Amino acid sequence: ETCPFSNAEIPVLFKILAFIGAAFIAFVLLRFFISLCRGIYTCFVGQLLGFTIDLRKMGEWAVVTGASDGIGKAYAEELAKRGLNVVLLSRTLEKLQSVAADIEKATNVRTKVVAVDFTGDISIYDTIRRELEGLEVGVLVNNVGMSFPYAEYFTLVPEGDKLMDQMIKANCTAATMMMRIVLPEMEKRRRGVIINVSSISAMFPLPLLSTYAGTKAYMDYISQAVHAEYKDRGIFIQSVKPAFVSTKMSKIRKVSYDVPTPTTYVTEALRTVGIEHSTYGYLPHKLRGYMQEAMRAWLPDCLLMKISKDSLQAIRKGYYKKKGMTDTFLGSKSSAEGSGEKKSS
């Protein structure tokens, strides 16, 4: 076939394409450099310049949900170190009492424990209101949450009806109702901080973790929206979006630079309160988050979901193989609603 371009035009065309490519790469690198500078500022410089919030001035008490383990426990401990009395809420009374005793032993603050099941009936919030009555709550940390035991297709999740109902109650309803409980008094005093623990999984839809990612996106969006409503009334609401942290829920025991302990993560995340109303909290997680933001800006969602689906399918396959389960859905040995559910229940 005859080339539509003359020999003289081809070098010019290559130069134009090369310029466009170089400009695109330069733009992406510049954007990442700006994000890196932002991450360093929000993690370190902002605090040194005094732009973070003095949480002790918000009120005498902090309230932490999901406080018996992991990130919630770390928030309770770190807030106590900053001089706030702490109300600990979670399901298991014995665990709460143990955490409360450790906090009182290590610090000079008071604690209060409230054993509630956030996957239960909405009447639990009447109990919580009564328990918090008369307390000057300056900080609320909505950390309680749950995830799937493993990546799975929507209709194949073991005990899916029950699990998804509980997940929505723990991951969405709990934070919504807790904000409704504490916000009126914070508004009267015109000061307060609310920290809602979302997830980096909230960034875009995740096939095979659809309900979990959806609930975390809800947490992120409601945090930013309510922050916009109340920021002029002296109330700071922050969405915290961690990647992997070494907790029971993540099932990752080995600690590394990008998989920190809950204490390491929370210590850095608290430095961003007053600076970022939506944060990844911890510098390595910020870098990962900024990279994913860039991918979201330049790649179509369908491609990102394809990449995520392939990755989670591989994890699912490994889980099935480990458990000796047969995958009737995809037609290879590796839940299916029949034998898979029975073995994983």
Image (spheres, rainbow, N blue to C red):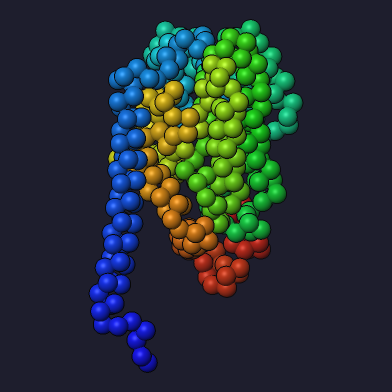
Looking at the image, is 248 positioned above or below residue 271? Answer: below
Residue 277: in sight, yes or no?
Answer: yes
Place of residue 217 in the rendered image (x, y in percent of width and height, measured from the top left): 56, 42
**Image quarter (top left, top right, bottom left or bottom right) of the N terminus:** bottom left
Q: Nearer the viewer, residue 133 or 150?
A: 133
Place of residue 255 in the rendered image (x, y in percent of width and height, measured from the top left): 33, 40
Residue 96: in sight, yes or no?
Answer: no
Give the image quarter of residue 229. Answer: top right
Identified at 56% across, 41% down, the residue is 216
Q: Nearer the viewer, residue 210 or 131?
A: 210
Place of residue 183 in the rendered image (x, y in percent of width and height, measured from the top left): 62, 19
Q: Nearer the viewer, residue 24 or 54?
A: 24
Q: Give the tally of numbered discs.
A: 0
Place of residue 241 in the rendered image (x, y in percent of width and height, measured from the top left): 47, 38
Identified at 65% across, 40% down, the residue is 168
Say left or right for 179 vs 26: right
Identified at 43% across, 47% down, the residue is 293
Give the farthest residue toward the bottom. 1
Say left or right for 318 vs 29: right
Identified at 43% across, 17% down, the residue is 53
Looking at the image, is 7 positioned above or below residue 82? Answer: below
Looking at the image, is 221 positioned above or below residue 108? Answer: below
